Image: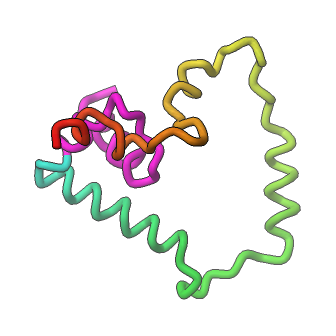
Amino acid sequence: MDTHTRLHEIISALADGELAASELELAFAALDTETGRQAWEAYRRIGDALRSEQCGHELSATFDARLASRLADVPIPPADGALAAVSGSIVPPGLPEPLEAGPLAQRR
């Protein structure tokens, strides 16, 4: 994966509140560039549109059933710890969010 794509993924994860604390400095460095700021703005607008009730986009009456059907076809990952790397990036309940406890917050 090229650097440009990786930086966009990091900015997207930051916008979604899903960025691991270990990647915060890289995300903030990316946001110091014009390309990074443009990506942040795009992801912010996408998120706003997805969360907005004013967009006038209503889901069809059968959306829930179609989504449930498609999800039922997705294989369940093995329980043998294959997702350990992913679960390490999620903040457990009761712990501070990465922006509150990450390396940049400690510099203040």
Q: Identify the residue at image location x=12%, y=54%.
A: 34
Is 4 included in the stretch rendered in magenta? yes
Using the image, determine if residue 14 lies above or below residue 41: above
Instruction: Say whether residue 105 is left or right of residue 107.
Output: right
Q: Identify the residue at image location x=46%, y=53%.
A: 16
Residue range corresponding to the magenta coloring: 1-30
Q: Identify the residue at image location x=32%, y=32%.
A: 23
Predominant SS of the magenta segment: helix
Using the image, determine if residue 105 lies above or below residue 77: below
Residue 21 figure quarter? top left
Pick whichever, 44 or 22, lies toward us. 22
Residue 45 place in picture, x, y as percent: 38, 69
Residue 70 place in picture, x, y as percent: 81, 48
Pick whichever, 99 or 78, lies toward us. 99
Q: Quadrant of the C terminus?
A: top left
Q: Identify the residue at image location x=59%, y=87%.
A: 56
Q: Quadrant of the N terminus?
A: top left
Residue 93 figure quarter? top right
